[in-house]
Image (cartoon, rainbow, N blue to C red):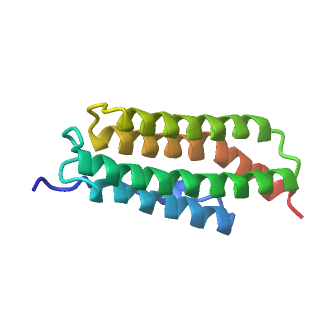
Amino acid sequence: MPPKLNLAGFTAEYLMDIPEIDEQHKLFFELLDKIGDATDDLYKPLSDDEVDNVIDVLNELRNYALLHFRTEESYMREIDYPGLPKQKNEHNRFITDVIRLEAELLNGSAMPAIKIRNFMHDWYRDHILELDKPFSSFYKKNSK
């Protein structure tokens, strides 16, 4: 069996100093590891059984992301964050992209798990660093 990919996971650069959101971000990165657990080789196209396993993980990640996005948007509404519309748009785009990935898998696309794992990881990393961090700064200045 090939070695599992060693993921960087959650690092201090992702901390927002909003405990509930930080915990949710950490859990998302932990859930990403399940994609690697769902297949014997991240770099080979998924077998039918592995597709089922990865779809289950994607469902869990999507549902968790929906919960997290609701939480984050609630914090943003609380302080009238001007970036909320852009955040909502990006959150919706992510969910749409995950649904598209699931559909590709269900339609027999020969996709390796690494493509899915990298998409999820890179989107979340970039989203936290580019959109959530500025919100965090705004939140610290404007929360009561």
> Foreground: 57 or 125?
57
The residue shown at (80%, 51%) is: 76
Report whether 5 appears left or right of 123: left
> Foreground: 94 or 48?
48
> Foreground: 49 or 14?
49
The image quadrant of residue 17 is bottom right
Q: Position of residue 18 (x, y in %)?
A: 69, 64
**Residue 83 in sight here:** no
The residue shown at (86%, 56%) is: 78
Report whether 126 appears left or right of 117: right
In this rendering, is residue 26 above or below 118? below
In which quadrant is the N terminus drawn? bottom left
Instruction: Report the number of discs.
Output: 0
The image quadrant of residue 31 is bottom left
Report whether 25 appears left or right of 74: left
The residue shown at (84%, 39%) is: 82
Q: Position of residue 144 (x, y in %)?
A: 90, 64
Q: Position of residue 102 (x, y in %)?
A: 43, 40
**Residue 128 in sight here:** yes
Q: Position of residue 65 (x, y in %)?
A: 58, 53
In this rendering, is residue 78 above or below 126? below
The residue shown at (21%, 41%) is: 43
